[in-house]
Image (tube, rainbow, N blue to C red):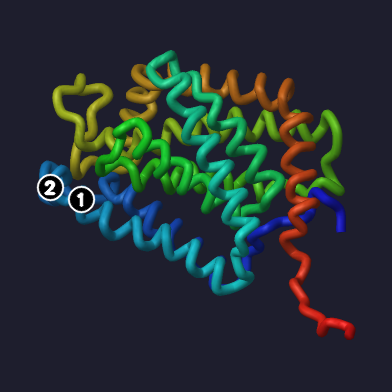
Amino acid sequence: MSSGQVRPVRLGRRSIAALALVSAVGVVAFGWPLLAGSDSGLSAHAKDAPWLFAALLPLLLGVVVATIADVGLDAKAIAMLGVLAAAGAALRPLGAGTAGIEPMFFLMVLSGRVLGPGFGFVLGAVSMFASALLTGGVGPWMPFQMLAMGWVCMGAGLLPGPDTLRGRGELYVLGAYGAVSSVLYGTVMNLQGWPYIGGLATGVSFVPGDPVGENLARFVAYCLATSLGWDLPRAVVTVVLSVTLGPAVLKALRRATRRAAFETPVTFEPSQR
């Protein structure tokens, strides 16, 4: 097995089921306002958000539990998860408040690429959780950030394998994926908060009960007017770092994974006396 194919956390049946459940709940949580009627009481979201937090976070943790139950998350995999999550959490504040410059994304994409979709989802969620604790950003938006970053890392793990993509071609694909996922991350997070922001101009504000197409048109206008200036720099930084630092980071991650030998079964032999 090649070093690029060695993954400490593989996707078993229970892991796939847990990921599908979490993703389905996340899609509903992000998108239900678009389908809600005008009498749905969206103004009560601020009071309901802590309950949503309480419902989503155990599901995210359930992914970890299901993964452990399927393949076993040994001490070496937990150590790598901790190191990468700490690195991602430390990188995120470096660009906070500076035109969307977030070097965290390139590390998450490359880690998901090397370590697979299961590990990637867990890493993305845990990194955002650690970052929220580090920066004091704990709030009803945090489970949405954990889900969105989990999706970003999981998608990187689902890209064509290293036997298909190699060298500069792999870097270009990772850069392109990083750019697209950076913009999509910002767009999805906009969808989480946009329906509940009051005082917006009529052309970009959410109108409960209006047809989905009309609200989506307003949402696109809202993204162009408010967050594109953050999403595009994030995408550019992710591409530049992926292409320039990508070879060294990929090599280090693959070497660490190969030496850790996550998939090597542990056997005990009787001593010879």
Q: Quadrant of the N terminus?
A: bottom right
The tag on residue 47 is 2
| Residue displayed at 35% across by 23% down | 221
| Residue displayed at 47% across by 35% down | 89
Q: Position of residue 93 (x, y in %)?
A: 43, 25
Query: Label 2, label 1: how many angstroms apart (C-alpha)?
Result: 7 Å
Residue type, label 1:
Pro
Q: Residues at badges 2 and 1 in contact (C-beta under 8 Å)? A: yes
Q: Is residue 192 above or below residue 50?
A: above
Location of residue 196 (image quadrant): top left
Circle 2 Cα neighbour tier, 10 Å, few/some/many (<14 / 14–19 / ≥20): few
Q: Position of residue 177 (x, y in %)?
A: 64, 35
Residue under numbered circle 1: 50
Residue type, label 2:
Lys
| Residue displayed at 39% across by 62% down | 59
Circle 1 Cα neighbour tier, 10 Å, few/some/many (<14 / 14–19 / ≥20): some
Asked which secondary structure carries label 1, the reply is helix
Asked which secondary structure carries label 2, the reply is helix
